[in-house]
Image (cartoon, helix red, strand yellow):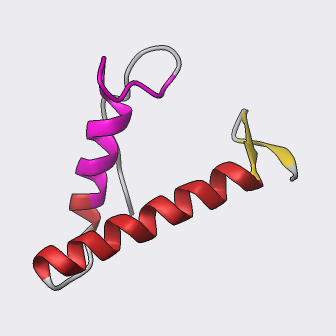
Amino acid sequence: MGWWKCDGGIIGDEPLDLLGDCATAIARAYERAHGRMPTKREWAAILLKVLGASDEYRVVEGEPVERVSLE
């Protein structure tokens, strides 16, 4: 597995694969529940809920994420 610097951080193949698998599972859940893929706004809300969490889903070192923007 390769690791490389990206925007001042470190990123690797395994985290990308895991996130890809997770994104696919979320999209499938939306298709089952709503008959469609999630919108950019819904993705931003999902990411903010997890990355901005202060306890239950805390996965970010340092301060929680306060804003997510998908363009």
Name the residue at 39% across, 24% down. 58
Say if 15 sits above or below 64 in the image: below
In the rendered structure, the answer to whether residue 6 lies left or right of residue 47 reads right
In the image shown, does 66 or 43 lie closer to the viewer? 43
In the image shown, does 57 or 60 lie closer to the viewer? 57
The magenta segment is 43-60
**59 within the magenta span:** yes
Which image quarter holds the C terminus?
bottom left
Residue 33: quadrant of the picture: bottom left
**35 within the magenta span:** no
Say if 36 sits above or below 47 in the image: below
Return the residue found at the far right: 2
Name the residue at 84% across, 45% down. 4
Q: Please provide percent x and percent y for residue 39.
A: 24, 70
In the rendered structure, the answer to whether residue 5 lies left or right of residue 42 reads right
In the image shown, does 70 or 45 lie closer to the viewer? 45
